[in-house]
Image: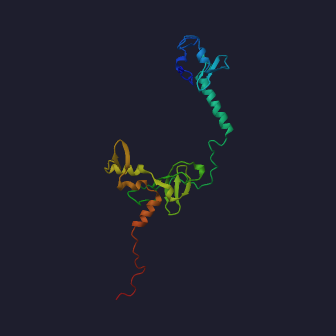
Amino acid sequence: MAIYTPPRPFYLPDAHLPNSATAPWTCRRCAHTWPCETASTYLTAGRCQCGSPTYWEKNGPRRWHPGPSCYNHADQMAALAEELHQYHQAHPHYPPARPAPPKRRRRQRPPYAHTPSGPGDIRPGTWLWVKPGGLHPAWGDIHRLAMLTRLDGRYCEVWLDDATVHRVKPHLLILERTPVVNTARAAGVTSLVSATGSRPGALRPEWQWLSWTVAEHLAHRSRYEQPKAEGPVQGVLFPA
């Protein structure tokens, strides 16, 4: 009858890991100087630049550096900074550099002030957020706060805080909610969202227009705005 022999562990057994409480290090099970005879079969010996012996696990990522540490926290941060510097030198386009900004008209802040009160109520003076892609890449691929200065179905004109004026498509403009929320709270509205537990809920149906784009507001205005009745240009010349 054959005697069952358990398979040899693939990694260094935990029982033969080093005990670093005392110097020199000792094996947890054998109580001999580490690495013991069992641990040596799982390790590859080496030597640090400081002269201390080092050990690498053959089948794993673990490493050991017996003796005093040859690096302090400042040395580790300096080595990390040098590594990042070398990486950026080897990859000069990471992160990508912004192109040179083209010429844009500059203007002082317009004296407009308008807070939307409902769907379609968009006029010059409304504060908006320009979505990424609405501006030239020189202004970054981020949301930018802007004031609407001219409303148009094809291209709207907006004013940024750097005093530049841009033309942006209306579907890339969304409302800035803060003025509307402040006005609603001053009027006694306690919440604009539905209560769905601890997480913030979605906007209530009567406040869904806060998440619309300017293009959606223009479509709503054209759908529900009544055309003005044209009256006579000139009065009756010869009354009866």
State the quadrant of the C terminus: bottom left
Along the viewing direction, whichever of 131 and 2 lies nearer the viewer: 2
Q: Position of residue 79 (x, y in %)?
A: 63, 27
Outermost residue, bottom side: 240
Residue 35 seen by the camera: no
| Residue 117 horizontal side relative to residue 28, left or right | left
Q: Residue at x 32, y 51 (%)?
A: 187
Q: How is the image coloured?
A: rainbow
Outermost residue, front side: 1
Residue 165 seen by the camera: yes
Q: Residue at x 35, y 55 (%)?
A: 205
Along the viewing direction, whichever of 159 and 205 lies nearer the viewer: 205
| Residue 48 horizontal side relative to residue 197, left or right | right
Vertical order, 173 against 59 (above or below): below
Q: Residue at x 65, y 30 (%)?
A: 82
Q: Position of residue 229 (x, y in %)?
A: 39, 74
Along the viewing direction, whichever of 201 and 139 lies nearer the viewer: 201
Say how many tags the image has: 0
Vertical order, 238 against 34 (above or below): below
Q: Position of residue 65 (x, y in %)?
A: 61, 19
Vertical order, 35 against 185 (above or below): above
Along the viewing direction, whichever of 75 and 190 lies nearer the viewer: 75
Q: Residue at x 59, y 17 (%)?
A: 39
| Residue 113 horizontal side relative to residue 159, left or right | left
Q: Position of residue 118 (x, y in %)?
A: 38, 58
